[in-house]
Image (tube, rainbow, N blue to C red):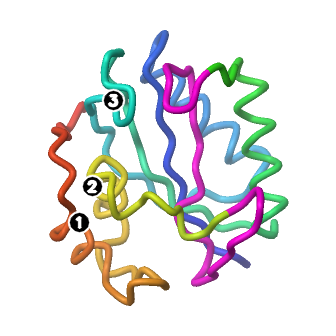
Amino acid sequence: MNVAYLLTGGNTGNRLQYLKKAAETIKKYCGTIVKRSAVYETEAWGIQDQNKFLNQAIKLSTKLSAYELLDCLLQIEEQMGRIRKEKNGPRIIDIDILFFNDDIIDARNLTIPHPELQNRRFALQCLYDIAPKKMHPVFKKTVAQVLDECTDPLGVDKFE
């Protein structure tokens, strides 16, 4: 079995309902959800003139390979109505693979660990909830250490 850490998020429509639907669909098609973080509300990262996001991290046990998981997650996003208009723009749902086992993958369509993880407090805070001691395979630091060193100034507030 493989262990993947995912981040779900969105900032349009019924944000909480979309996070719940994403988790249900991930469970149905991708594997077993072992743990979920609290839901956090965060300022938009990148293009800041948009609604706040809700985000949640998921620890997933899966038989899928990293590439199969990516394909499954992209299909879930599409099935839920995600339309890719602009990078970092508003969206119903976004599902990112943060870690996959301790793998380091740098391919055209897949980079693991997520290449911006260390720069995004919202992702690190969610991940910290479920895996504070998980080692970042590139930086050789725990999630807790990477979060502590993160310089992202955007606020991250517990939603539930």
Q: Kindly indicate whether the residue at mark 1 contacts the one at mark 2 (C-beta within 8 angstroms).
A: yes
Indicate left or right for 157 with 123 as reference: left
Which dot, 2 or 1, sits closer to the camera?
1
- From the image, which quarter does the N terminus lie in? bottom right
> Counting other residues with Cα less than 10 Å from the Cα at mark 1, is it few (<14), some (14-19), or many (20 or more)?
many
Does residue 80 show up magenta in the picture? no
Kindly report the distance in space between the C-alpha atoms of the residues bearing marks 3 and 2: 15 Å
The residue segment tinted magenta is 86-110
Task: State which quadrant residue 112 falls in.
Answer: bottom right
Label pair 3/2, CB-CB below 8 angstroms = no
User: Which of the two labelled residues, at mark 3 and mark 1, occupies the earlier sequence position?
Assistant: 3
Q: Which residue is mark 1?
A: 147
Instruction: Name the residue: 35% across, 36% down.
Output: 45
Residue occupied by mark 3? 44
Q: Which mark is residue 125?
A: 2
- Circle 3 or circle 2, nearest the eye: 3
Q: Nearer the viewer, residue 50 or 133?
A: 50
Q: Is residue 153 left or right of residue 26?
A: left
Main SS of the magenta part reads: loop
